[in-house]
Image (tube, rainbow, N blue to C red):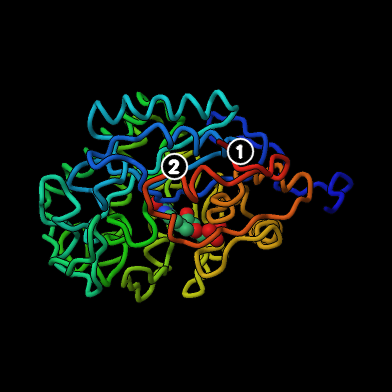
């Protein structure tokens, strides 16, 4: 164990984010864990999981469906029924009781969805009818992808409204704010990327057209819950799930030019080898910036501190380290080693294994 008290990590400096005072700059990154029931209703185990991680300056929840048609998986939680809202309340209350803060990540699957992953069996909706070629995970097996339905202007309008309604539901459920998932191949990203957005109407074509859906969703959510409770996550150039962006810079610059004046709680940005988003976009964003190193390499203390020092980010989000280290902030403060994730089988399984059974550094026994 190293003595870090003489040189405490800059990650441990307090800061503010929207209307929240944070004790540190360590954000728990959104991570889908699929522990809800098949109606998208959160289960009590999720309260334990998030409360264990309440030492984070901010927790961003796993991706949450803003509507049934935006669902990616059956056992992904939602925020579009009153039963779901009621079941989230003990989760957010447990985090608050443990001294933490939590935003809800609103995640619309777009073309990543599948009829077998929706209770209504509907066809996924996307900017254009461009299907995935790889198979899609369902609860029971892998399934062939389906061709998504290209959204009409009216469907785009009602989807924007769904995001705003889910944001209001998030506040009723006790969340401190919402993060719109505009990253990692989900619907908002599909609009931004020319590989998936072949539209020639106002929501496609040039950079501003492709940014329009992201702008409308963000404005609608900010109107619904306040800009200082609204955040947006972006991963420009991320090729996950067969995404392709020929020239990301003009699109993301147009997007930030429209959103910077709104005064959002934060922008959450992932760097990618394809496009150095942090270097290009930091000067174009005057608000709070949360950085993430991306999925190609798991975040370490050194890489996180580099983002703060060299990339001008204000906070850093950690994904996988938070799976295995519920007390990650204490470990940073004490210079304690970080536990590795034991296998990835439990990322998306149903029970407490690999979810709520990781011990802390000072309590090495697995919690009962
Ligand atoms: C199991 C798992 C689930 C994830 N689910 C989401 C998600 O729901 N929403 C999202 O924006 N990113 C998701 N991510 C990406 C993480 O937020 C993060 O960007 C990524 O893991 C890289 O950070 P890390 O190196 O600290 O893990 C997920 C990552 C993992 C490992």
Image quadrant in which you'd find residue 25: top right
Quarter placement of the C terminus: top right
Look at 21% across and 61% down and name the residue there.
111
Q: Position of residue 90 (x, y in %)?
A: 42, 25
Rounded to the nearest angstrom, the CA distance separating label 2 from label 1 is 13 Å
**In the image shown, does 97 or 274 lie closer to the viewer?**
97
Q: Say which element carries label 2.
A: strand
**Image position of 107 with respect to 113: above or below:** above
Q: Position of residue 209 (x, y in %)?
A: 26, 60
Number of numbered discs visible in the structure rendering: 2
Disc 2 under 8 Å from ligand 1? The reply is: no
User: Residue 57 bears which disc, if any?
Assistant: 1
**In the image shown, does 210 or 13 lie closer to the viewer?**
13
Image quadrant in which you'd find residue 189: bottom left
Look at 62% across and 37% down and name the residue there.
55
User: Residue 61 bears which disc, if any?
Assistant: 2
Is 196 positioned to the left or the right of 36 in the image? Answer: left
């Amino acid at each position: 164990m190293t003595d870090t008290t003489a040189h405490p990590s800059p990650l441990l400096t307090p800061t503010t984010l929207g209307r929240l005072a944070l004790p540190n700059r360590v954000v728990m990154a959104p991570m889908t864990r699929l522990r809800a029931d098949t109606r998208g209703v959160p289960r009590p185990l999720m309260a334990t999981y998030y409360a264990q991680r309440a030492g984070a300056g901010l927790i961003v929840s796993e991706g949450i469906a803003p509507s049934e048609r935006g669902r990616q998986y059956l056992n992904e939680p939602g925020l579009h029924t009153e039963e779901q809202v009621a079941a989230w309340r003990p989760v957010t209350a447990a985090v608050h009781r443990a001294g933490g803060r939590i935003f809800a990540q609103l995640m619309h699957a777009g073309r990543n969805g599948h009829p077998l992953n929706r209770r209504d069996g509907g066809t996924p909706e996307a900017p254009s009818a461009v299907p995935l070629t790889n198979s899609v995970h369902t609860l029971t097996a892998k399934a062939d992808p389906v061709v998504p339905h290209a959204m009409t202007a009216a469907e785009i309008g009602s989807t924007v409204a769904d995001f705003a309604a889910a944001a209001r539901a998030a506040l009723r459920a006790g969340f401190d704010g919402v993060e719109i998932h505009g990253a990692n191949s989900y619907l908002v990203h599909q609009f931004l990327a020319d590989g998936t957005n072949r539209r020639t109407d106002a929501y496609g074509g040039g950079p501003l057209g492709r940014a329009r859906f992201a702008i409308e969703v963000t404005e609608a959510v900010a109107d619904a819950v306040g800009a200082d409770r609204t955040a947006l996550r972006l991963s420009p150039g991320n090729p996950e799930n067969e995404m392709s962006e020929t020239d990301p810079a003009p699109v993301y610059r147009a997007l930030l030019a429209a959103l910077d004046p709104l005064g959002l709680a934060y922008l959450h940005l992932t760097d990618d080898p394809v496009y150095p988003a942090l270097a290009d976009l930091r000067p174009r964003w005057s608000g709070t910036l949360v950085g993430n190193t991306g999925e190609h390499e798991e975040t370490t203390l050194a890489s996180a501190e580099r983002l703060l020092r060299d990339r001008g980010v204000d906070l850093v989000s950690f994904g996988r380290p938070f799976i295995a280290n519920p007390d990650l902030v204490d470990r940073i403060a004490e210079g304690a080693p970080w536990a590795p994730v034991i296998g990835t089988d439990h990322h998306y399984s149903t029970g407490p294994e690999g979810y709520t059974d990781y011990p802390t550094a000072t309590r090495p026994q697995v919690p009962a």
